[in-house]
Amino acid sequence: MASKGLNAQTQPNSLIFIYDRYGKLLKQFLAGSTGWDGTFNGNPLPSDDYWFNVQLEDGRHFSGHFTLKR
């Protein structure tokens, strides 16, 4: 079965950007990394809505939002 999503095997050099509701960049990381732990400068962020942009290694882009719950 083929793996789905972004990981170290599928488009590992894809970039993921996480933003707050005001458009402030909180985190940028590669798809194959450990990801985001819900903090900014070592401080936990509140439960709220956050947005993401993904720049795939093959040139495609997509975005969306999610809710961080504590």
Image (tube, helix red, strand yellow):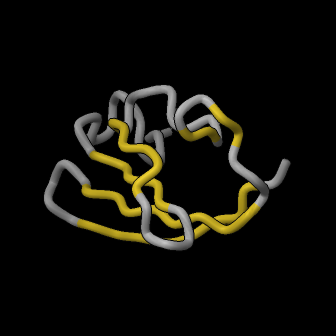
Residue at 27% across, 67% down: 61
In the rendered image of this protein, does residue 57 appear above or below residue 35?
A: below
Quadrant assignment, res 44 = top right
- Residue 39, position as x, y percentages in the image: 62, 39
Residue 54 falls left or right of residue 45: left
- Residue 19, position as x, y percentages in the image: 47, 60
Residue at 29% across, 46% down: 15
In the image, farthest residue toward the left: 59
Residue at 50% across, 39% down: 1
Residue 4 falls left or right of residue 38: left
Quadrant assignment, res 14 = top left
Instruction: Judge by depth and name the residue closer to the eye, 18 or 24.
Output: 24
In the image, farthest residue toward the right: 70
Quadrant assignment, res 32 = top left
In the rendered image of this protein, does residue 11 appear above or below residue 24?
A: above
- Residue 49, position as x, y percentages in the image: 67, 68
Instruction: Judge by depth and name the residue closer to the eye, 63 or 3.
Output: 63
Residue 39 falls left or right of residue 13: right
- Residue 48, position as x, y percentages in the image: 73, 64
Q: How many marks?
A: 0
